[in-house]
Protein backbone atom coordinates (compact mmCIF):
# COMPACT_ATOMS: atom_id res chain seq x y z
CA UNK A 1 0.00 0.00 0.00
CA UNK A 2 5.06 2.73 -1.08
CA UNK A 3 6.06 4.58 -4.04
CA UNK A 4 6.42 8.23 -4.76
CA UNK A 5 4.21 9.83 -2.11
CA UNK A 6 1.88 6.87 -1.65
CA UNK A 7 3.36 4.28 0.69
CA UNK A 8 0.75 2.02 2.07
CA UNK A 9 1.36 -0.17 4.77
CA UNK A 10 3.03 1.36 7.51
CA UNK A 11 1.15 1.51 10.76
CA UNK A 12 2.15 3.62 13.71
CA UNK A 13 3.10 0.35 15.42
CA UNK A 14 6.43 0.59 17.27
CA UNK A 15 8.37 -2.67 17.36
CA UNK A 16 10.93 -3.00 20.11
CA UNK A 17 13.80 -5.45 20.08
CA UNK A 18 13.57 -8.16 22.71
CA UNK A 19 16.66 -9.18 24.59
CA UNK A 20 17.78 -12.70 25.31
CA UNK A 21 19.34 -13.26 28.69
CA UNK A 22 22.96 -14.39 28.65
CA UNK A 23 22.76 -15.82 32.16
CA UNK A 24 22.04 -19.55 31.98
CA UNK A 25 19.71 -19.20 34.98
CA UNK A 26 17.63 -16.51 33.32
CA UNK A 27 14.00 -17.32 32.55
CA UNK A 28 13.35 -18.22 28.88
CA UNK A 29 11.62 -15.56 26.80
CA UNK A 30 8.03 -16.31 25.77
CA UNK A 31 7.28 -17.11 22.14
CA UNK A 32 7.14 -13.83 20.18
CA UNK A 33 4.08 -15.02 18.32
CA UNK A 34 1.96 -15.75 21.36
CA UNK A 35 -1.27 -13.77 21.72
CA UNK A 36 -2.12 -13.10 25.34
CA UNK A 37 -5.64 -11.75 25.53
CA UNK A 38 -5.90 -11.66 29.32
CA UNK A 39 -6.77 -8.25 30.86
CA UNK A 40 -3.76 -6.00 31.14
CA UNK A 41 -1.52 -8.35 29.19
CA UNK A 42 1.18 -6.77 27.03
CA UNK A 43 1.53 -7.56 23.36
CA UNK A 44 4.61 -9.57 22.45
CA UNK A 45 7.09 -7.92 20.10
CA UNK A 46 9.59 -9.40 17.68
CA UNK A 47 13.37 -9.50 17.84
CA UNK A 48 13.63 -7.22 14.83
CA UNK A 49 11.92 -4.05 13.66
CA UNK A 50 9.74 -4.61 10.61
CA UNK A 51 7.80 -2.31 8.35
CA UNK A 52 4.26 -3.11 7.18
CA UNK A 53 5.52 -5.50 4.54
CA UNK A 54 7.73 -7.46 6.92
CA UNK A 55 11.03 -5.88 5.84
CA UNK A 56 13.69 -5.69 8.56
CA UNK A 57 14.30 -1.96 8.84
CA UNK A 58 17.57 -2.54 10.72
CA UNK A 59 18.91 -4.97 8.12
CA UNK A 60 17.81 -3.91 4.63
CA UNK A 61 17.24 -6.82 2.28
CA UNK A 62 16.29 -9.20 5.08
CA UNK A 63 12.75 -10.19 5.98
CA UNK A 64 11.97 -9.78 9.68
CA UNK A 65 9.85 -12.45 11.39
CA UNK A 66 6.40 -11.13 12.18
CA UNK A 67 4.12 -11.92 15.09
CA UNK A 68 0.39 -12.57 14.89
CA UNK A 69 -0.53 -9.27 16.55
CA UNK A 70 1.73 -7.29 14.25
CA UNK A 71 0.43 -9.05 11.17
CA UNK A 72 -3.20 -8.46 12.12
CA UNK A 73 -2.71 -4.74 12.80
CA UNK A 74 -0.63 -4.14 9.68
CA UNK A 75 -2.95 -6.15 7.45
CA UNK A 76 -5.95 -4.25 8.80
CA UNK A 77 -4.40 -0.86 8.03
CA UNK A 78 -3.24 -2.00 4.60
CA UNK A 79 -6.63 -3.49 3.78
CA UNK A 80 -8.45 -0.29 4.68
CA UNK A 81 -6.02 1.68 2.55
CA UNK A 82 -6.64 -0.56 -0.47
CA UNK A 83 -10.40 -0.10 -0.10
CA UNK A 84 -10.19 3.68 0.15
CA UNK A 85 -7.77 3.97 -2.77
CA UNK A 86 -9.97 1.62 -4.78
CA UNK A 87 -12.93 3.92 -4.24
CA UNK A 88 -10.85 6.86 -5.46
CA UNK A 89 -9.78 4.87 -8.52
CA UNK A 90 -13.41 4.07 -9.37
CA UNK A 91 -14.20 7.79 -9.34
CA UNK A 92 -11.01 9.40 -10.63
CA UNK A 93 -9.62 6.74 -12.97
CA UNK A 94 -9.27 7.74 -16.59
CA UNK A 95 -9.59 4.26 -18.10
CA UNK A 96 -12.13 1.51 -17.62
CA UNK A 97 -9.29 -0.87 -16.73
CA UNK A 98 -8.24 1.30 -13.79
CA UNK A 99 -11.82 1.88 -12.67
CA UNK A 100 -12.51 -1.86 -12.79
CA UNK A 101 -9.35 -2.65 -10.85
CA UNK A 102 -10.35 -0.10 -8.22
CA UNK A 103 -13.74 -1.80 -7.90
CA UNK A 104 -12.00 -5.15 -7.50
CA UNK A 105 -9.87 -3.72 -4.69
CA UNK A 106 -12.96 -2.50 -2.87
CA UNK A 107 -14.71 -5.86 -3.27
CA UNK A 108 -11.84 -8.19 -2.38
CA UNK A 109 -10.27 -6.16 0.40
CA UNK A 110 -13.63 -5.37 2.02
CA UNK A 111 -14.25 -9.12 2.19
CA UNK A 112 -10.76 -9.79 3.55
CA UNK A 113 -11.11 -7.00 6.10
CA UNK A 114 -14.39 -8.47 7.35
CA UNK A 115 -12.74 -11.88 7.86
CA UNK A 116 -9.81 -10.33 9.71
CA UNK A 117 -12.12 -8.31 11.95
CA UNK A 118 -14.07 -11.44 12.84
CA UNK A 119 -10.87 -13.29 13.77
CA UNK A 120 -9.63 -10.37 15.85
CA UNK A 121 -12.97 -10.02 17.63
CA UNK A 122 -12.96 -13.68 18.63
CA UNK A 123 -9.48 -13.24 20.10
CA UNK A 124 -10.23 -9.88 21.72
CA UNK A 125 -7.46 -8.45 19.56
CA UNK A 126 -7.59 -4.71 18.91
CA UNK A 127 -7.29 -3.55 15.29
CA UNK A 128 -7.22 -0.03 13.83
CA UNK A 129 -10.72 0.93 12.69
CA UNK A 130 -9.78 3.89 10.48
CA UNK A 131 -6.84 5.23 8.56
CA UNK A 132 -4.29 7.16 10.53
CA UNK A 133 -3.50 10.77 9.57
CA UNK A 134 -0.56 9.81 7.34
CA UNK A 135 -2.51 7.31 5.26
CA UNK A 136 -5.56 9.57 5.05
CA UNK A 137 -3.34 12.32 3.69
CA UNK A 138 -2.16 9.94 0.97
CA UNK A 139 -5.73 9.16 -0.03
CA UNK A 140 -6.60 12.87 -0.05
CA UNK A 141 -3.62 13.64 -2.29
CA UNK A 142 -4.57 10.97 -4.83
CA UNK A 143 -8.18 12.17 -4.77
CA UNK A 144 -7.02 15.51 -6.17
CA UNK A 145 -5.73 13.79 -9.30
CA UNK A 146 -7.78 12.45 -12.20
CA UNK A 147 -7.66 10.97 -15.69
CA UNK A 148 -4.40 9.81 -17.24
CA UNK A 149 -2.26 11.39 -14.53
CA UNK A 150 -4.15 9.50 -11.85
CA UNK A 151 -3.95 6.24 -13.81
CA UNK A 152 -0.18 6.47 -14.19
CA UNK A 153 0.42 7.13 -10.50
CA UNK A 154 -2.17 4.66 -9.20
CA UNK A 155 -1.07 1.78 -11.42
CA UNK A 156 2.61 2.31 -10.60
CA UNK A 157 1.79 2.46 -6.92
CA UNK A 158 -0.34 -0.67 -7.03
CA UNK A 159 2.32 -2.71 -8.83
CA UNK A 160 4.95 -1.73 -6.27
CA UNK A 161 2.57 -2.17 -3.37
CA UNK A 162 1.30 -5.61 -4.36
CA UNK A 163 4.81 -6.94 -4.84
CA UNK A 164 5.51 -5.93 -1.24
CA UNK A 165 2.17 -7.29 -0.07
CA UNK A 166 2.90 -10.70 -1.57
CA UNK A 167 6.17 -10.81 0.41
CA UNK A 168 4.36 -9.59 3.53
CA UNK A 169 1.69 -12.30 3.39
CA UNK A 170 4.26 -14.97 2.58
CA UNK A 171 6.15 -13.85 5.68
CA UNK A 172 2.99 -14.21 7.77
CA UNK A 173 2.17 -17.58 6.21
CA UNK A 174 5.61 -18.86 7.13
CA UNK A 175 6.12 -17.24 10.54
CA UNK A 176 2.77 -16.58 12.23
CA UNK A 177 1.87 -19.55 14.42
CA UNK A 178 -1.64 -18.51 15.44
CA UNK A 179 -3.86 -20.98 13.55
CA UNK A 180 -6.63 -18.62 12.42
CA UNK A 181 -4.32 -15.79 11.37
CA UNK A 182 -1.99 -18.15 9.55
CA UNK A 183 -5.02 -19.51 7.69
CA UNK A 184 -6.10 -15.96 6.84
CA UNK A 185 -2.66 -15.17 5.45
CA UNK A 186 -2.59 -18.43 3.50
CA UNK A 187 -6.01 -17.96 1.88
CA UNK A 188 -5.55 -14.24 1.19
CA UNK A 189 -2.13 -14.61 -0.44
CA UNK A 190 -3.44 -16.08 -3.75
CA UNK A 191 -5.94 -13.22 -4.01
CA UNK A 192 -3.19 -10.65 -3.66
CA UNK A 193 -1.06 -12.53 -6.18
CA UNK A 194 -4.02 -12.37 -8.58
CA UNK A 195 -4.24 -8.62 -8.04
CA UNK A 196 -0.55 -8.28 -8.84
CA UNK A 197 -1.00 -10.18 -12.11
CA UNK A 198 -3.93 -7.98 -13.12
CA UNK A 199 -2.31 -4.65 -12.29
CA UNK A 200 0.96 -5.69 -13.94
CA UNK A 201 -0.98 -6.47 -17.13
CA UNK A 202 -2.71 -3.08 -16.95
CA UNK A 203 0.66 -1.35 -16.54
CA UNK A 204 2.06 -3.22 -19.56
CA UNK A 205 -0.92 -2.15 -21.69
CA UNK A 206 -0.24 1.50 -20.85
CA UNK A 207 3.29 1.50 -22.30
Image (cartoon, grey):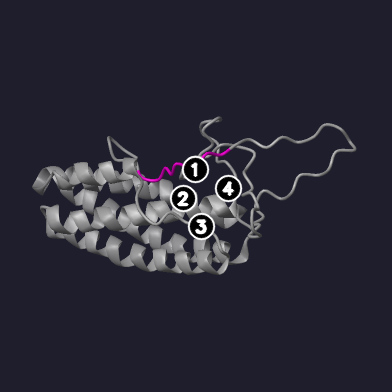
The residue at which mark 4 appears reads as: 66
Q: Earlier in the sequence, mark 2 or mark 4?
A: 4
Pointer 3 and pointer 1: residues touching (CB < 8 Å)?
no
Q: Is residue 126 magenta?
A: no
Vertical relation: 183 (above or below) 36: below
- Which numbered disc, 2 or 3, marks the residue closer to the eye? 3
- Give how far apart the Cα atoms at labels 2 and 3 are: 12 Å
Marks 1/4: CA distance? Answer: 12 Å
Q: Pointer 1: what residue?
A: 13
How many residues crowd mark 1 within 10 Å: few (<14), some (14–19), many (20+)? few
Residue 186 at what x, y percent from top left?
A: 52, 63
Q: Furthest-right residue in view?
A: 25
Q: Nearer the viewer, residue 193 or 40?
A: 40
Residue in view at x 32 percent, y 42 percent: 133
At a point 34% along the width and 50% down the height, the residue shown is 131
Q: Which residue is mark 3?
A: 126
CA separation, marks 2 and 4?
Answer: 10 Å
Question: Which badge, 3 or 1, is on the more N-terminal residue?
Answer: 1
| Residue 154, horizontal then vertical, whole percent | 22, 47
- Contact check, label 2 and label 4, Cβ < 8 Å: yes
Report the front residue among 166 and 64.
64
Secondary structure, mark 3, is: loop
Amino acid sequence: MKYHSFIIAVTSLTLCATGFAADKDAKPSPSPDAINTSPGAETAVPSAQADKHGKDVNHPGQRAPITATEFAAMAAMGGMMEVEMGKVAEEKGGSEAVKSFGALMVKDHSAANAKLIAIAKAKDLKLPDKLDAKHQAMVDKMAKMSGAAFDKMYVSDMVTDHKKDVAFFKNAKENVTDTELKSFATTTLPIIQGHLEKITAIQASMK
